[in-house]
Image (tube, coloured by chain):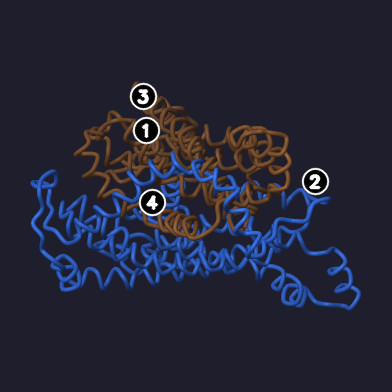
Chain colours: A brown, B blue
Amino acid sequence: MTLLYGVPLFWIVLTSFKGSDEVFGPAFSFSPTLDAYRDMIGPQLWSSLQQSVAIAVGTTAFVLLIAVPAAYAVARVSGWVSMIGLGLLIVFQMSPQTANVIPLFQIFGEWRMLDSTAGVIVADTALLTPFAVMLLRPFFRAVPPQLEEAAAIDGAGVMRIFATVVLPIARNGVFTVGTLVFLLSWGEFLYAVNFYLSPGQYPLSALLAQQVSAFGINWPGLMALSVLTSIPILIVYLLAYGQLRDGLAAGSVK
Amino acid sequence: MTTATTTPPARRPGPGQARKRRRRLSPHAPFALPAVVVLGLFSLYPLIQLLRMSVSDVSTSNLGQDWAFVGLQNYLDGFASGATGDALARTAIFVLAVTILGMIGGFAAAAALRTKGWWSSVLLSLMVFAWALPPVVNGSVWKFLLASDGLANSIVTGLGFSERPFLYDQYWALGSVAVVNAWAVIPFNTLVFRAALLQIDREQFEAAALDGASRWQEVRHIMLPAVRPTSLVLLILTVVYGFRSFDFIYVMTYGGPGTATNTLPFLGYLQAFTRYDYGLGASTSVLAVAMVLLLAVVYARSIRREETRG
């Protein structure tokens, strides 16, 4: 098990320090070089990095902004309206992304949202919001309604109860979901590849997808790009691991 | 959560109480409004549009204009060419492989990592990190490892076998991509199974050890019953994960060699974006969404059951 997960990760890093003539040579006896990184680091990389940051941060903020209150509503409102809402959320969450990209491409074309970062952010938000609401819902359900009733008796309005009573209790859930949405939108590439009309605008994930499907792959370069793409993930992961480990299991099957 | 111990847990209220609560808590509904607007415009409307495209003749030239209604022609074309049928069969094999490997692998890893040693926490964090990496990164490295002179083949030839065409043969390719997908979902399944296993009372294991239970008996009589309640939901999630998977296929084989790794969702994508037959691609995607509807019903019912159980 350790090998199965350790070796691929180790191999990415190892290969990124190889010269292109040594890729398939002996695994460990090679002269380490930074050539692959030197090839990759350039204006394109910086602009892609900026795009990735804009998309991931924008999507995370947007998703949290609409999914957190929605999850609270879905957890509290009962009856057939919320049943239909939940059913739709599940269908959206489960639909293949390849089925969304076809109509969205046409709709964005009509609404002049192609080739814009805002378009990709909106598409990613629509893609990840159902998942975020479903994951957040159990956290809001775990807030005892009696607490809210007590606050209501004290004269607090719905908004204030939400902000001061409910949200602090569901904080862990919000944090877990925010982290996941960031990770997922950082790695999303299908929308980026299809909605940006020129590779110059691609975020890192799309750049990587484009290079790996190109003819005659430059493996050390690709692995260097993989490492550079993964560094922000590593940082977020180190900050959020404990929360992620516990929150994910709690939220996703309940 | 000290309050939770002093107040009764939020169970399903009785009928009279429910009516009262609904009226009183209806101010919660507006909280959903922003999400309703965004999802209505960018999730629901696209689905409707997809349905419309699937019964129309849509290509690049008339994508932004009026489409000619062709009825079920796209669907019929898809089946008549054999592409849809083949993709359905491949999808079934693919999903079956991902699900079986993902569920068994996840449970095995969770059972092995249940103990609190430093090695198991290192391994768990390594697995979750691999899971958190973008699929393009994981797909790239697996494409590299499975290349004709990559690491996997060095091991195979080192063991005295002949080289295997992991990604370059129509049968091997589907299997390879399915295995990599299972590899990618196992960490998540491990986390979920592990959470269920951690709920088990330590005394149960001690009692079993006193009775001289074997490791297998422990698994069978203590661990399996403990994970059963979450298993159905996780099973559906894993099936859905395998079904909607396209990123590893995109990166590792792009549907090839030939059409060997065209699963239903990926076939729809290729038809729309490399053949520019949006109508045909939409019809294939509608079939994929229809299959999802089926799974969604099962899923909704099983989470409801989980929640009413408390």
- Name the residue that disc number 2 marks: B3
Q: Which mark, residue A47?
A: 3
Amino acid type of the residue tagged 3 in the rendering: Ser
Asked if the residue under mark 3 is in contact with the one under mark 4, i.e. CB atoms within 8 Å, the reply is no
Viewer-nearest of discs 2 and 1: 2
The quarter of the rendered structure image containing the C terminus of chain A is bottom right
Task: Using the rendered image, report if marks 4 and 3 lie on a common chain.
Answer: no
- Name the residue that disc number 1 marks: A203
Question: Is label 1 in a helix, a strand or a loop?
Answer: loop
Single out the residue that lies furthest toward the right. Answer: B210
Q: Which mark, residue B247?
A: 4
Q: Disc 3 versus disc 1: distance between alpha carbons? A: 8 Å
Which numbered disc flags the more N-terminal residue, 3 or 1?
Answer: 3
Asked if the residue under mark 1 is in contact with the one under mark 2, i.e. CB atoms within 8 Å, the reply is no
Task: Using the rendered image, report if marks 4 and 2 lie on a common chain.
Answer: yes
- Label 4 Cα crowd, 10 Å radius (few <14 / some 14-19 / many 20+): many
The subunit letter for the residue under badge 3 reads: A
Task: Using the rendered image, report if marks 2 and 1 lie on a common chain.
Answer: no
